[in-house]
Image: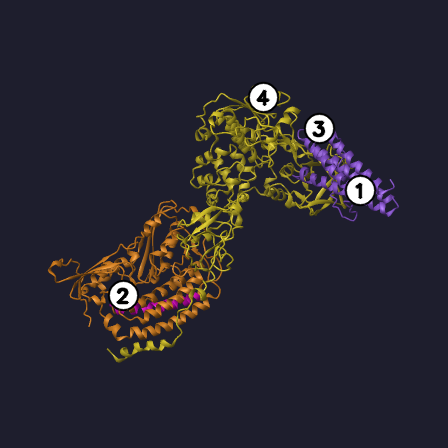
Chain colours: A purple, B orange, C yellow
């Protein structure tokens, strides 16, 4: 990955894979109501993808300097299996963990690439993922930790 | 000029022979009910022989209010807005007595501050009422300057009421349980200034009315209440005190803060219209003095209301009571019966006007001149709503 | 006659040169006194439309009228006072009684208009020149027409209460109850707010009348669990009671309890007169004998339907028995409610788990209708490392153990995680079992979902609340009988998108502490495993809960749902109302002919789309 477009293509592909992942999970979901929720997650990932496509086409810019709130919820939760009888709580954990992993990957890359232009792209992508993580963590804070 | 009525000297209760109206010797005249003689909605049915009254009959029934009945259909708190209407020139006595009766039946102890505020209010009311009355007696004898002075000055006292209670006439300030507010800021100072002015005004009135040759000539000897009439007729207040009876509930059976105030009962020895007027003048001065004492001693902090139940469904245990106070015209009483419900079973308002305007008036009028009947009526200081309550 | 008397009257001339008393333009030059009782001002935003002004007005000069902008506000009747100045006598009693202190008067007293209908106006809504007038009569400080403070409930002292499972609140005596009942202004905002719409003002009225049998009858019209709700209700009624705006709300819950405590259980049948029921021949199955299920059972029996209740546990009551500790709700009082319901001829099947002992499909076959109220029985998981440590207990389990007379084995040093009622119950139960309790909660105390009284009492009983503490990991302790929790402090950060502030873990401020046990009480979820996937799909389940239709009906004909598993509030009173409402729905379904104008009968098969 040496050019900005290559990096963006990779990221776009990642979002598509995430959308596919939730869609296939939704097909298998056994718990009542989970199908709709997982399809919504897939939709959310598609929105992330659209955003990156817009970045690539120049209609939208990444915001590497933006500060994103980190609730640090997923950081201390256990890994859960994306099983067929996945619960809402676990589905959110899976989603948070995925976004966190992506965030860490891009942050890591940003440190490793020497070129400052590319670094900015990675930082920008990391911030995007941090926002996605915040989205799911807020959802977790509201829905799962509602009574707590 | 004015003959002594004579009739009142001996207590003869036998009914006179009915006069033969068809003889053509007599004229029958209705005075009132819309008579400017400030006694309100009441009329006198007079039979005249020339210009001398030989028969007098008091008629009421023009008010259509039925206060006592109204009270039976309103709950205990609502009634306090009704009672003030029984005596327009001095509603506060009704407010106080109604509240006192309710408090006695329900066992409520009114706090010290409220006791003083109530006392001050009652004396301010006495002052306002007497100022109006002095105007009335003056006007009834054709002296129209003094009414202008006193009624205008009364408005200064009403200003004080407005400040303290939020209203000029129907104050609705003394409420079962206490009063509705404390003294407003700067009230004492303003009240003292008005009291000083009132003293001055009374000096002037004494000069132009009580030392007036016409007033003296017309009122002296008019409507003499002899001491032997006082008890059989139930005569109270200045009407009784003017003929030497030292009777005043404020001293005889002190209520509120009267046992802590410094005053003596005013008595006179001229039991006629002039004597009664002079007695009231002295009592007006006394009131001013009492107000000054109250201004000095009324506490400015602390509760002014007892702990109250929820007045929206206030039930009072069964019982009956009679409470009384000295109003400007004498003993004013409330008899109240409660039956344990949210509504009073019966209230009877005992106003002094009942005897003064009917039995006493009907007797004193006989033999007087038609020109003096208004002066006589005013000199008894009566309010028709107390009769037709 | 002397000369002085002749001359003296001429003194009047001296006054001819004095300033006149009168004012040339009285209404302009002469405003009313600062406390004058003039035209009314109502701060319509503050007003809750309790109608006390209307009640106290002896002239009937005040009507309460609906005002568009206040419709549907919680704790607000949506009505505002409309004054008729053709009737008003300006006594100001309306101002004195105003529970919200929104009503006062201006010192304006002159109002001239050619249109007399203008004198009939809604203060604070219709635009009037004096609305912003600063003067005028208002109720003086310290002057009340009803007692603002509530009658204190006798409570065991914290020292006493932790010694046993005896009920902490001792109940009102008759004098206290009557005094407290006296404080009600009978506005009825509580009725609108109560999920079950209990007739609160009327049963409080029955206390004032000393007619407790009537009070009991009134309560059973909407709630067959009065002894229970009189103790542990979440009492939303009290949170909206307008008496609480300036003072303390009427103790509605304690008054309800008082009525039930006055009536002997043996008298219930006579008082409530349920003998008159005519059997309908229909049969209804109820799954779950909690407040929702038994409430449905009670009202279905009123309609004459035969009722069979299936309960997995050995006793009825659900969370009321296994979740609420007996110091809050003694078994005897819960049984008083339950036994009366059962006495109406409800068939109880204990230790019967649907899906294991009988299939759900079997019930559908055997009964004309089925009501599901299986509650939330599965403790939520924290999903942190080490949660499966043997010294980590669930709050629900601890409470159930204690309810069943078993020793939950908490040890001495106990940490409770969570801030809801279960966390408080688990903490206070632990105190009674001799534990030293620390409560770790991820947000601030003010954010705790538990009843404020519960929080206060748990603190009084010696539980230490550590707010803004987020557990991150559980590990073995040095002492094998203990467990160690790692937690970090949290800062509350305002979410830029709004909502309540969110706790953010501060990784530089981590703590570690060992306990004999950790009780996790962070919430609970439903267990719907007894329903097959096909049936679940038809029942419309979102976030693990049912979302029933207007009559508690579902997408599956003849199946009705209610209770914690079907509402957002998850409290006893909502479950009771769900049960009552489901009974109405089931009756409509079973007796469509009894509702001739009914076009919303729940038996109409609806498409998937309609039930969203």
How far is the residue under mark 2 from the one under mark 4? 96 Å
> What chain does badge 4 belong to?
C
Q: Which residue is mark 3?
A: A29
Cβ–Cβ under 8 Å for marks 1 and 2: no
Using residue C401 as the reference point, say whether residue B271 is left or right of it.
left
Locate the N terminus of chain B by quadrant: bottom left
> What chain does badge 1 belong to?
A
How far is the residue under mark 2 from the one under mark 3? 102 Å
Report the disc number at residue B379: 2
**Residue C367 point in image, percent of width and height:** 55, 21
Q: Can marks 2 and 3 be said to lie on one chain?
A: no
Cβ–Cβ under 8 Å for marks 2 and 3: no
In this view, C317 is above or below C251: above
How far is the residue under mark 4 from the one under mark 3? 26 Å
Between B106 and A61, the one lying in front of the other is A61
In this rendering, the label closer to the viewer, 4 or 3: 3
Q: Is residue C24 magenta?
A: no
Q: Element type at marker 4?
A: helix
Locate the C terminus of chain B by quadrant: bottom left
**Residue C597 point in image, percent of width and height:** 47, 29
Report the disc number at residue A56: 1
């Amino acid at each position: 990955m040496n050019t900005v477009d290559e990096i963006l293509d990779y990221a776009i592909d990642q979002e598509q894979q995430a959308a596919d992942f939730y869609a296939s999970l939704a097909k298998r979901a056994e718990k009542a109501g989970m199908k709709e929720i997982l399809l919504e997650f897939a939709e959310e990932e598609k929105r992330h993808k659209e955003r990156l496509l817009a970045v690539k086409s120049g209609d939208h810019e990444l915001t590497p300097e933006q500060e994103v709130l980190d609730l640090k919820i997923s950081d201390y939760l256990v890994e859960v299996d994306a099983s067929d009888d996945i619960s809402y709580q676990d589905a959110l954990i899976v989603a948070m963990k995925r976004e966190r992993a992506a965030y860490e990957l891009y942050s890591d890359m940003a440190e490793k690439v020497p070129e400052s232009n590319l670094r900015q792209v990675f930082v920008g992508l990391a911030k995007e993922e941090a926002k996605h993580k915040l989205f799911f963590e807020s959802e977790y804070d509201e829905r799962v930790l509602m009574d707590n | 000029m004015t003959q002594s009525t004579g009739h009142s000297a001996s207590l003869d209760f036998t009914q006179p022979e009915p006069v033969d109206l068809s003889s053509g010797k007599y004229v029958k005249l209705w005075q009132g009910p819309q008579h400017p003689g400030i006694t309100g909605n009441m009329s006198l049915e007079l039979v005249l022989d020339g210009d001398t009254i030989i028969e007098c009959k008091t008629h009421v029934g023009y008010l259509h209010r039925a206060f006592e009945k109204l009270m039976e259909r309103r709950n205990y708190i609502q009634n306090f807005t009704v009672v003030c209407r029984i005596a327009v020139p001095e509603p506060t006595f009704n407010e106080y007595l109604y509240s006192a009766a309710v408090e006695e039946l329900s066992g409520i102890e009114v706090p010290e501050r409220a006791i003083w505020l109530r006392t001050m209010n009652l004396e301010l009311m006495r002052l306002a009422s007497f100022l109006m009355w002095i105007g009335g007696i003056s006007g009834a004898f054709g002296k129209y300057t003094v009414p202008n002075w006193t009624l205008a000055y009364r408005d200064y006292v009403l200003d004080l009421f407005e400040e303290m209670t939020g209203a000029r006439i129907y104050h609705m300030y003394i409420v079962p349980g206490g009063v509705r507010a404390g003294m407003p800021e700067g009230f004492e100072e303003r009240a003292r200034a008005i009291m000083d002015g009132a003293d001055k005004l009374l000096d002037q009135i004494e000069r132009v009315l009580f030392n007036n040759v016409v007033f003296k000539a017309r009122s002296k000897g008019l409507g003499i209440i002899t001491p032997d009439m006082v008890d059989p007729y139930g005569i109270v207040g200045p009407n009784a005190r003017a003929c030497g009876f030292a009777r005043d509930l404020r001293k005889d059976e002190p209520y509120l803060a009267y046992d802590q105030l410094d005053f003596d009962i005013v008595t006179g020895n001229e039991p006629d219209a002039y004597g009664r007027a002079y007695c009231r003048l002295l009592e007006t001065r006394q009131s001013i003095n009492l107000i000054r004492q109250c201004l000095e001693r009324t506490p400015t902090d602390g509760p002014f209301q007892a702990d109250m139940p929820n007045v929206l469904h206030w039930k009072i245990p069964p019982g009956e009571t009679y409470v009384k106070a000295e109003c400007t015209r004498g003993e004013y009483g409330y008899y109240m019966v409660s039956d344990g419900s949210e509504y009073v079973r019966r209230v009877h308002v005992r106003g002094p006007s009942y005897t003064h305007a009917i039995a006493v008036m009907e007797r004193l009028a006989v033999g007087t001149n038609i020109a003096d009947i208004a002066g006589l009526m005013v000199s008894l200081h009566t309010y028709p709503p107390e009769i037709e309550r | 006659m002397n000369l002085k008397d002749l001359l003296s009257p001429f003194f009047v001339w001296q006054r001819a040169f004095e300033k006149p008393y009168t004012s040339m333009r009285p209404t302009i030059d002469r405003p009313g006194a600062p406390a004058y009782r003039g035209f009314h001002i109502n701060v319509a935003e503050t007003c809750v439309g309790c109608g006390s002004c209307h009640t106290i007005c002896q002239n009937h000069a005040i009507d309460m009228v609906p005002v568009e902008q206040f419709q549907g506000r919680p704790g607000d009747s949506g009505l505002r006072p409309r004054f008729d100045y053709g009737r008003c006598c300006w006594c100001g009693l309306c101002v004195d009684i105003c529970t919200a202190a929104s009503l006062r008067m201006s010192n304006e007293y002159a109002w001239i208009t050619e249109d007399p209908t203008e004198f009939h106006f809604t203060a604070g809504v219709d635009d009037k020149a004096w609305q912003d007038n600063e003067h005028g009569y208002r109720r003086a400080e310290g002057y009340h027409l009803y007692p603002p403070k509530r009658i204190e409930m006798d409570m065991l002292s914290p020292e006493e209460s932790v010694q046993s499972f005896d009920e902490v609140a001792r109940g009102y005596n008759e004098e206290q109850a009557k005094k407290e009942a006296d404080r009600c202004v009978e506005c009825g905002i509580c009725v609108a707010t109560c999920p079950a719409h209990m007739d609160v003002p009327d049963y409080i009225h029955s206390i004032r009348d000393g007619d407790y049998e009537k009070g009991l009858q009134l309560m059973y019209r909407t709630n067959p669990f009065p002894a229970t709700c009189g103790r542990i209700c979440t009492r939303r009624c009290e949170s909206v009671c307008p008496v609480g705006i300036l003072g303390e709300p009427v103790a509605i819950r304690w008054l309800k309890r008082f009525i039930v405590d006055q009536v002997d259980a043996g008298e219930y049948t006579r008082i409530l007169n349920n003998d008159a029921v005519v059997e309908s021949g229909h049969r209804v199955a109820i799954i779950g004998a909690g407040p929702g299920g038994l409430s449905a059972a009670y009202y279905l029996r009123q309609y004459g339907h035969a009722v069979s209740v299936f309960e997995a546990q050995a006793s009825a009551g659900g969370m009321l028995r296994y979740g609420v500790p007996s110091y809050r709700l003694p078994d005897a009082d819960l049984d008083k409610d339950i036994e009366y319901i059962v006495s109406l001829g409800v068939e109880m099947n204990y230790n019967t788990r649907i899906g294991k002992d009988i299939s759900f499909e079997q019930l559908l076959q055997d009964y004309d209708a089925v009501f599901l109220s299986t509650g939330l029985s599965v403790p939520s998981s924290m999903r942190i490392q080490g949660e499966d440590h043997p010294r980590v207990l669930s709050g629900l389990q601890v409470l159930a153990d204690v309810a069943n007379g078993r020793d939950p084995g908490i040890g001495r040093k106990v940490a409770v995680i969570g801030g809801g009622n279960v966390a408080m119950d688990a903490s206070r139960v632990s105190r009674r079992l001799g534990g030293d309790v620390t409560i770790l909660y991820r947000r601030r105390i003010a954010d705790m979902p538990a009843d404020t009284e519960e929080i206060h009492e748990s603190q009084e009983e010696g539980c230490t609340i550590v707010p803004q503490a987020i557990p991150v990991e559980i590990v073995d302790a040095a002492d094998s009988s203990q467990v160690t929790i790692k937690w970090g402090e949290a800062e509350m950060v305002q979410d830029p998108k709004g909502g309540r502030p969110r706790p953010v873990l501060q990784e530089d401020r981590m703590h570690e502490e060992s306990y004999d046990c950790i009780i996790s009480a962070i919430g609970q979820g439903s267990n719907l495993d007894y329903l097959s996937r096909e049936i679940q799909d038809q029942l419309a389940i979102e976030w693990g809960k049912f979302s029933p239709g207007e009559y508690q009906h579902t997408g599956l004909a003849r199946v009705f749902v209610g209770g914690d598993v079907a509402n957002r509030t998850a409290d006893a009173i909502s479950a009771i109302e769900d049960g009552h409402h489901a009974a109405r729905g089931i009756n409509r379904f079973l007796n469509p002919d009894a509702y001739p104008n009914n076009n919303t009968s729940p038996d109409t098969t609806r498409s998937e789309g309609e039930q969203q």
